[in-house]
Amino acid sequence: MKRRDFCKLSISALVLGVFDRFSKAAEAAIPVAAEVKEKATVYFTKEITPESLVKIYSKISQDIQGKTAIKLHTGEPHGPNLLPRELARALQAQIPESTIVECNVLYPSPRQNTEGHLETLKTNGWTFCPVDIMDADGDVNLPIRGGKRLKEVAVGKHIENYDSMVVFTHFKGHAMGGFGGSLKNIAIGCASGKVGKAQLHGAGWSIGEPFLERMVEGGKAIADHFGKHIAYINVLKNISVDCDCDAHGAKPTCPDLGILASTDILAVDQASIDMVYALPEKDKHDIVERIESRKGLHQLEYMAELNMGNRNYNLVEI
């Protein structure tokens, strides 16, 4: 394809056109033991609407059953970049016996305790269905198989009440992790506010590989807990360099890209990163700088090391 023709393509076509290059690079970086795996499947739609969300969820919902937790980041009061509530409303309506779940936070915030957290939910419009603050009654320890930083992590006790989990993630930057995808959503998001989050952050709230590896290990505990009864959706919209835990998050400079979904947590986060990195420099500069300044790509490397999924995937547009 001639360069002048390539430049005329839409963002979605551009992304799809370069995925093969990224996939080959990712494959080369996978440990030998993982190379024999079949490629994961990641579904993609460039439309960010309730209808497209419901459609893409139907592709990954085969093992979601029983009482289901929908894990999303409901944000600080009046957070500027939160996902539209109508998306979550449409998804929740499609999942029988489903409840949005959250845990309290460690940093100073109204969400530091259950009472303030519930008030924040009202402020931000999460009132269309029940929201379970999973650590309202304390925590429970989940084992981390193969972890080199942690052997267990404290998560919200109510996690024991659910048979399945749908991880509904606002993909964006993060001050400590570089980026927040499905991994960050379940790792930090399901850790209990008083104990688990302190375990993952460690002393001094340092950034870099030790923190990233603890975060990945926390996510592995959640993924292993639900086994095949967990699925992942990343919404690439309002992609700020800051997380929704920042009430004054920076205005997004990256364009909206679409929705990605998979039953493979590593594949869906890898595909999200690939999609961002495929953008023109002017569109990706800020978010890539945030990711790389925090060594955020190590999340993917360590997830592969812990056999949490496959960095090599087939992208299926719907």
Image (cartoon, rainbow, N blue to C red):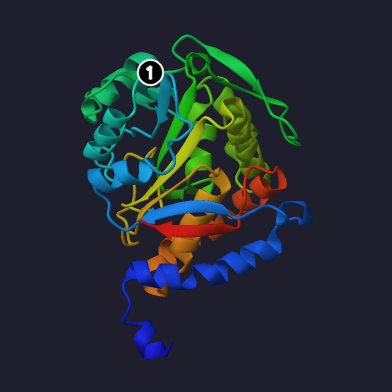
Q: Identify the residue at the far top of this view.
A: 137
The quarter in which the C terminus is drawn is: bottom left
Q: Quadrant of residue 243?
A: top left
Residue at left offset 56%, top offset 32%: 228
Q: Residues within 10 Å of mark 1 (few under 14, many from 20)?
A: many
Residue at left offset 45%, top offset 29%: 64
Residue 254 drawn at (x, y percent):
35, 61
Name the residue nearer the viewer: 134 or 3.
3
**Is residue 201 something that shows in the picture?**
no
The quarter in which the N terminus is drawn is: bottom left
Q: Quadrant of residue 12?
A: bottom left
* Left or right position of 124 against 97: left
**Is residue 301 something that shows in the picture?**
yes
Residue 63 drawn at (x, y percent):
49, 32
* Left or right position of 60 against 50: right
Residue at left offset 41%, top offset 46%: 234
Residue 220 drawn at (x, y percent):
62, 35
Q: What amino acid is found at the position of numbered circle 1 in the picture?
A: Asp
Is 151 situated above or below 240? above
Name the residue nearer the viewer: 183 or 264.
264
Residue at left offset 30%, top offset 41%: 54
Secondary structure of the residue carrying numbered label 1: strand
Name the residue nearer the viewer: 312 or 139.
312
Number of numbered callouts drawn: 1
Residue 38 drawn at (x, y percent):
64, 53
Q: Which residue is mark 1?
A: 132
